[in-house]
Image: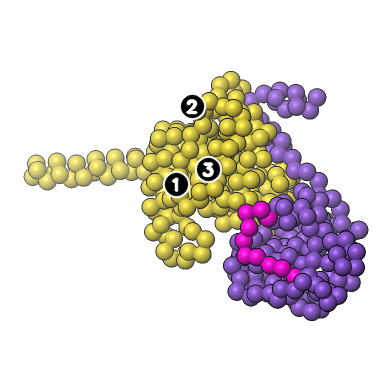
Chain colours: A purple, B yellow
Amino acid sequence: MESGLTRRMVFVTVGTTCFDALVAAVDTAQVKEQLWKKGYTHLLIQMGRGSYVPTKSLGDDGSVAVDYFTFSPSIKDHLREASLIISHAGSGSIFETLRLGKPLVVVVNEDLMDNHQSELAEELAERKHLICARPQTLCETIKNMDLESLLPYPPADATPVAQLINGFLGFPDDSFSQKLE
Amino acid sequence: MPPSISNSQSIAAAITAVCLVILLLLLRFAYVTYRTGRPHRTPQRRRLRTLIVLGSGGHTAEMINLLEVLPKERFEPRVYIAAATDNMSLQKARVFESSLGSQVEVAEFHQVYRSREVGQSYLTSVGTTIFAIGHALWLIFQIRPEVIICNGPGTCIPLCIAAFFFKLAGLRWSSIFYVESIARVRKLSLSGLLLYKLHLADQIFVQWPQLQKTYPKAHYVGRLM
């Protein structure tokens, strides 16, 4: 605004969980400085059920503007608007972001007991669809991240399951060959 | 003495009867286990009553993606069941059904008590599981599904166990298909593992190739999300 900078927003989402470690990590001066250096101007945090409240800032002192809220029915609008998304490892927000084709950093919550969620984030990171981080490594991750290296997420295809179910029950395969034409 | 002889005779007869019943049950059990997982040989020409067990959030989204490509006219009528504490999933199923423009009679919607809520202790879940199986038996009795499609989490387990009892009793044969969630990359979920180990499901689908390597009887099908 003031310096004619185009608005580039980072959207942080924890979904319906409580993930203070992530909210506190993005609220540190170091992380905000790295985001500013990368050209991001605004930081919007959806803090969910957490109790850590980030410091609001208008960003008029030459740093990112910070705003936050707890929940919103229109998360999708924020995802659409954002230039970068930093999310918890919930599969809902992961796939919603990937389908929008937005660059995504997933931060794994190590405090969860049965943490199979990190499996999905790590697998998708290995396939270069997103970047995986921990709260304590978030600053390093943002500093070193190369969003150009990320690969688009291919659309899902449920026809193999449907074909197997069909074949198992003894239905002819015709309705699928029609679809392929 | 005559009375004691007839007494011992009737005891022997009772023991023989009990043994026969146990033997028959064991034979039936062996047959049901043998048949489960074997494809139907005769070509299918009719519609099959289908029960769709909805999980929650991401699970339901995966299920709807599968239903989109399933030939609907073969899987009719469709009965949807979701956990009693899950208000969203049945709503999503209703939206899906109305998007098909299907008549009201084609789809039904029910709720079932869950065997275990997220975070509930394993000890108290023994009692709630028994209650959930009772409710599931009643639902399966009413619905009599020929096909059951489910994808976890726990909601489907009591229903699959109830369906197994009906198979055992010879009242209704249902083919059970289980799709493991895309969130499971290295290990099956507890629901998936139970169905896999107990041979309750005819086919188990996984969405990552490395999971299929660990559980060779599962089918790798690519991603539903």
Q: Residues within 10 Å of mark 3 (few under 14, many from 20)?
A: many
Q: Is residue B109 among the parts visible in the rendering?
A: yes
What residue span does the magenta drawing correspond to? A66-75
Residue at left 49%, top 42%?
B81
Q: Is residue A125 among the parts visible in the rendering?
A: no
Q: Is residue A142 left or right of residue B39?
A: right
Compared with A136, B196 (above or below) is above
Give the residue at mark 3: B90
Q: Which callout, 1 or 3, points at the residue further toward the start of the chain? A: 3
Q: Amino acid at mark 2?
A: Glu
Q: SS at mark 1?
A: strand
- Give the alpha-carbon distance from disc 1 to disc 3, as whole Å: 11 Å
Quarter of the picture containing the N terminus of chain B is top left
- Give the alpha-carbon distance from disc 2 to disc 1, as whole Å: 20 Å
Mark 2 vs mark 1: in front = 2
Q: Amino acid at mark 3?
A: Leu
For residue A74: magenta? yes
Give the residue furthest to the front.
A2
- The answer for which chain carries disc 1 is B
Q: SS at mark 3?
A: helix
Residue at left 77%, top 61%?
A85
Residue B171 occupies which quadrant of the picture?
top left
Compared with A63, B102 (above or below) is above
Q: Which callout, 2 or 3, points at the residue further toward the start of the chain? A: 3
- The answer for which chain carries disc 3 is B
Asked whether the residues under marks 1 and 3 belong to the same chain, the reply is: yes
What percent of the width, then of the height, locates residue B118? 52, 61
Give the residue at mark 2: B105
Q: Which mark is residue B112?
A: 1
